[in-house]
Image (cartoon, rainbow, N blue to C red):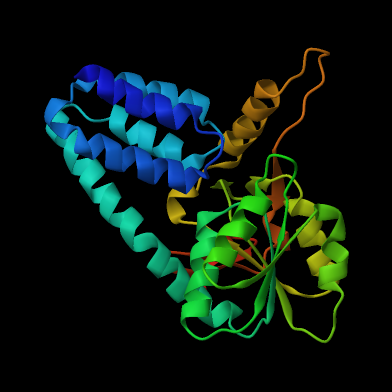
């Protein structure tokens, strides 16, 4: 039965369509359904493969490292049960903490696909918010259109647009507008997200619009590790002509007005991130 455990990790490794949080949730759920047949070697082998393949997704590398630190199968079970509980609670906590920050914005401009952003927007709508959402593509692989389509199925007013139209949606002075994106990793200096995020935040800053990043605290890493994440993605997407492209980019934390996590609302300063 160890092959089923390995298959669970392989499915997570090969999933290029889902976001980091969705991949983790599916993996944890599947592993726990197989817990009666776990072998520690299979868990460790799968964790190493996941860490290598998803190097730019901080929550997945953190999960991998935690699994590798387990000395017994019982330790791994305790770890994954606890992580599953946190994953289930996360959407509600993010939505609850982001509500007071964004509820006055009647247009939210976001980019690419983010389960954290989706949780926040859906939480606002469930609380009576009547605004609309503009979802920019976030590079060809950013899957912004998928995000827009899913939000529309939840009854929200959504527009799916290419990144090049960002200025148009930010310039409308008749509607209070905010920018909100997710993050795959956060460091002392930058956060990592889909290509196009940097320009979107720069445009929003020039217009003095609210700029919010939403992500759980497990995605905190140091600057050196975030740089390695970026490099790993450039190498992974190198073409046969020796040229490379990166679906991710680093955005300066100076451009972020607030970071909303499951713990609350944080502001960036010269001393790093601090709770507001």
Image side of residue 23 versus residue 180, left or right: left
* Figure disc tally: 0
Image location (x, y in percent) of residue 251: 71, 50
Image side of residue 239 versus residue 181, left or right: right
Q: Which residue is rendered at x = 53% and y = 45% of the image?
A: 19
Image location (x, y in percent) of residue 128: 51, 86
Which of the two residues, 157 or 60, is positioned nearer the viewer here? 157
In the figure, 111 relative to 257: above or below? above
In the figure, 143 relative to 267: above or below? above
Q: Which residue is rendered at x = 59% and y = 50% of the image?
A: 188
Q: Which residue is rendered at x = 36% and y = 32% of the image?
A: 65
Which of the two residues, 132 or 180, is positioned nearer the viewer here? 132
Image location (x, y in percent) of residue 24: 40, 42
- Is there any visible trace of residue 104 in the rendered image? yes
- Report which quarter residue 1 is drawn in: top left
- Is there any visible trace of residue 273 in the rendered image? no
In the figure, 112 relative to 72: above or below? below
- Report which quarter residue 212 is drawn in: bottom right
Image location (x, y in percent) of residue 112: 66, 51
Which of the two residues, 253 or 204, is positioned nearer the viewer here? 204
């Amino acid at each position: 039965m160890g092959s089923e455990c390995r298959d669970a990790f392989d499915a997570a490794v090969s999933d290029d369509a889902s976001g980091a949080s969705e991949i983790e949730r599916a993996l944890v759920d599947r592993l726990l359904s197989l817990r009666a047949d776990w072998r520690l070697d299979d868990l460790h082998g799968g964790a190493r493969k996941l860490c290598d393949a998803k190097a730019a997704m901080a929550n997945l590398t953190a999960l991998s490292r935690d699994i590798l630190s387990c000395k017994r199968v019982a330790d791994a079970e305790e770890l994954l049960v606890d992580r599953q509980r946190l994953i289930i609670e996360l959407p509600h906590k993010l939505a609850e903490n982001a509500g007071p920050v964004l509820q006055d914005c009647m247009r939210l401009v976001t980019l690419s696909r983010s389960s954290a952003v989706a949780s926040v927007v859906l939480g606002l709508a469930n609380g009576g918010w009547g605004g609309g959402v503009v979802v920019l593509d976030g590079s060809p692989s950013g899957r912004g259109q998928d995000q827009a389509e899913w939000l529309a199925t939840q009854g929200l007013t959504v527009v799916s647009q290419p990144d090049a139209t960002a200025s148009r949606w930010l310039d409308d002075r008749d509607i209070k507008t905010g920018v909100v994106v997710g993050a795959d990793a956060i460091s002392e200096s930058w956060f990592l997200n889909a290509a196009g995020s940097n320009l979107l935040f720069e445009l929003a800053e020039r217009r003095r619009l609210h700029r919010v990043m939403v992500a759980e605290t497990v995605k905190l890493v140091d600057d050196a590790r975030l740089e390695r994440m970026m490099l790993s993605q450039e190498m992974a997407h190198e073409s046969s002509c020796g040229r490379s492209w990166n679906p991710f980019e680093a955005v300066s934390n100076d451009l972020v007005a607030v970071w909303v996590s499951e713990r609350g609302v944080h502001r960036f300063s010269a001393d790093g991130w601090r709770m507001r």
